[in-house]
Amino acid sequence: MDSTTGGERPEADRPRSGEPLPPIETLLESLGTTPAGLAGVEASRRLAARPSRRREAGRGARALTLLIGQFKSPIILLLLVSAALSASLGDSTDTLIISAIVLASGLLGFRQEWVAADAVAGLLALIRIRATILRDGRPAEIPIEEVVPGDVALLNAGDLIPGDGRLLEARDLFVNEAALTGETFPVEKAAADGLFQGTDVVSGAARLLVVHTGEETEFGRISGSLRLRPPENEFEHGIRRFGYLLLELTLLLVLAIFAINVVLHRPALESFLFALAIAVGLTPQLLPAIISVNLAHGARRMARRRVIVRRLAAIESLGGMDVFCSDKTGTLTEGKVRLRATLDVEGAPSEPIGRLAYLNAALQSGYADPIDRAVVAAGGPELDGSEKLDEIPYDFVRKRLSVLVRRDGRTLMVTKGALDRVLEICTTAETASGEMVEMAAVRPGIDRLAAEYGGRGDRLLGLASRDLGPATGIERSDESGMTFRGLLVFDDPLRPEIAETLGRLAALGVATKVISGDNRLTAAHAARLAGLPTTELLTGGDLRRMSDEALIRRVGRVAVFAEVEPNQKERIILALKKAGHVVGYLGDGINDAPALHAADVGVSVADAVDVAREAAQIVLLEKDLRVLEAGVREGRRTFANTMKYVFMATSANFGNMSSMAAASLFLPFLPLLPKQVLLTNLLTDLPEMTIAGDRVDPEMVDRPRRWDLDFIRRFMFVFGAVSSAFDFLTFAVLIHLLGASPGQFRTGWFMESVVSASLIVLVVRTRRPAHRSRPARPLTLATALVAATAASIPYTPLAPLLGFEPLPARFLLALALIVGLYLASAEAVKAVFYRREAASAGRTKAR
């Protein structure tokens, strides 16, 4: 059967011990392809035959999973079972009403989360990972999801492997397989070797025959069976702890209510339903939907500011970030590296040094970084008479790039790289006059040049060569006994606005730290001009000699890390996290993926290498920290609006449900029927669905904020107590002053409860007096609509079904006065509460 349409799979790369892999020719034949790749028409046919069906099925499965998720709360499930039991006892009306309210609540949450997910999917399409594939014999860039078996992929440094397959050819190819094997160091690959999706190219170039894609790959099979998910970030950890707090309170209250009502000889089923309804009222079951809507709304706002969110929870982490780490190049600087000078060993300008550098940069076939592009852009000799014989690609351990060139009858290995890494492989140097001297004779002068140019912020590379005679290939061992030829001086101007931008980030409570591979003088100079403190600086050498405990103690005070090796970036990030910081990291290179994974929020840019973008949670469409600053503000707005819902739910809901539980102890009837409790909960949640678009006071985005369960608990008890006090006032007025019947009591308290819970939103949404913080129009309209709905339901045909009855005008006037007093009291309590919280925070900080 044809393997491309679901038949037997060719064993291209399955790691089975002792079994030889099939010949490449056999694979090409079984896949119906050639080394030049598939025709475009055939690739389209294969894509239509396989992945689209899975995508549609996946979409349907996600919808079903999301819908079921709205009802997976044990309390909701228990309530539905109890409603079914009630139906079996003949109370079909109440059963239908309760079921309809629970269903409406679930569908509302589902719709909000589904729309949010669709919106985010649209944004992610802007930064899809792409692969270079041969189609009709020509290279074409396509989304990685559209790669099909039989495609031939062209691979270069920084590329993600688009599927499992076999190498048709490879040149100095090193692959990072840590995602599958856990092995830290890159693995060298040769033609006919197997490659796996989920790995990435560190250096070199290759041509890959794709055999398996998607779920059929080894990575897809493993991740599918394990259902891997990203590690929990600080915001998600806060949500989980908040959930535990509510669960404890709910269980205690439900058990107490049910037990007391049974002792009072109330009907067991009705008491049970009432207790469960109270539990639903206490539980902010729309919290997942509210969070999803808030995050999706924040993601859309951030997209308008050129920031794309790949993982929604990262929005909150970005807002909570208090330390931001980044490289120097392209962040503090403009990222427009320019070759400013080519110098001989004595510091004089030298054209021969420029020509050698040009040969090295123009003929290398690995990842062309900004340095190579700058050398080529500066110009050099025609390459017609030059033949490249071999190369040793740049890697982040050697920090060198060597090219073997035959030109003018000579075979020469030309090496350029970090100055110290080039100097360590040189034994001689060539002076301007062509004289060969020992390195010891010129080393002091080279060190003076490095200090002079580095102190001005320039970046220096070393250039060396070695005549290899008749050699046609080179090995890493050949990088020895070389002749030092000179220096390459690069500059990368500082962004004109960078000092102001970093100052604004600092004002937002975000400290910037530079983690750079440049030498300490260059890095310190750029950091100083950007306004960062440079009194304490750590180098890669310092880090190697420092224990983890010592680094954790010092890392918060250091703003510049220079001469850092790739694996040390991750160590710095982890030390900052262990020191109690929420850490962001901006990276766009091949070696940045571990640090991006380790950070609380990994940030990359749209033109970064694939492996960096895939590791990042947030992608900037422009490498400009002003864009990041806007993202930080949006993250804090989103967090502030999420916390508004938490405060609303924990104050009004907790107060009302506690009052209801207490009232059930002394009233000869249930204060509200189960269906009325559920309707109350549904109506009070509706205005909060608009909270994502609410305005946020400036002081709520002026510093990082995190989940604070102690603060939430204090807020809940204080404002819940205020709510309960006015609930009991309502009870007293309804029973003792107005002589309400059970039906009138329930109607009056339902109206007071819903109207007050709706309007209190406008009070607790801000720390300011409510009249000094204008809510967004949708929130205002939703609040008014819910209040009007609650006031009018008793006068509609639905009233008898819900157990309500019309109230006389004097009842309505009394309820209006109670609501007005409640709002005024909540404002007064709020002022005292936040004043005491500020004083307490000040005392804590002083200690």
Image (cartoon, rainbow, N blue to C red):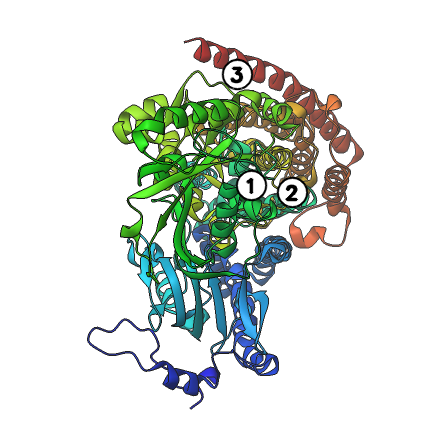
How many angstroms separate mark 1 from mark 3 (CA)? 26 Å
What amino acid type should be assigned to the residue bearing mark 1?
Ile
What amino acid type should be assigned to the residue bearing mark 2?
Met
Which disc is residue 302 wearing?
Answer: 2
- Above or below, 158 relative to 664: below
Quarter holding the N terminus? Answer: bottom left
Q: Secondary structure at mark 3?
A: helix
| Residue 729 shows in this picture | no
| Residue 429 shows in this picture | yes
Mark with earlier residue (1, 2): 2
Judged left or right of residue 291, residue 301 is: right
Judged left or right of residue 233, residue 494 is: right
- The one nearer the camera, 122 or 641, is 122
Query: Residue 699: x percent and y percent?
Result: 63, 22
What amino acid type should be assigned to the residue bearing mark 3?
Glu
Query: Residue 110: x percent and y percent?
Result: 59, 56
- Above or below, 133 relative to 248: below
Which disc is residue 837 wearing?
Answer: 3
Mark 1 or 3: in front is 1
The crowd level at tag 1 (other Cα within 10 Å; few <14, some 14-19, many 20+) is: many
Quarter holding the C terminus? Answer: top left
Residues under numbered marks 1 and 3 in contact, where contact means CB atoms less than 8 Å apart: no
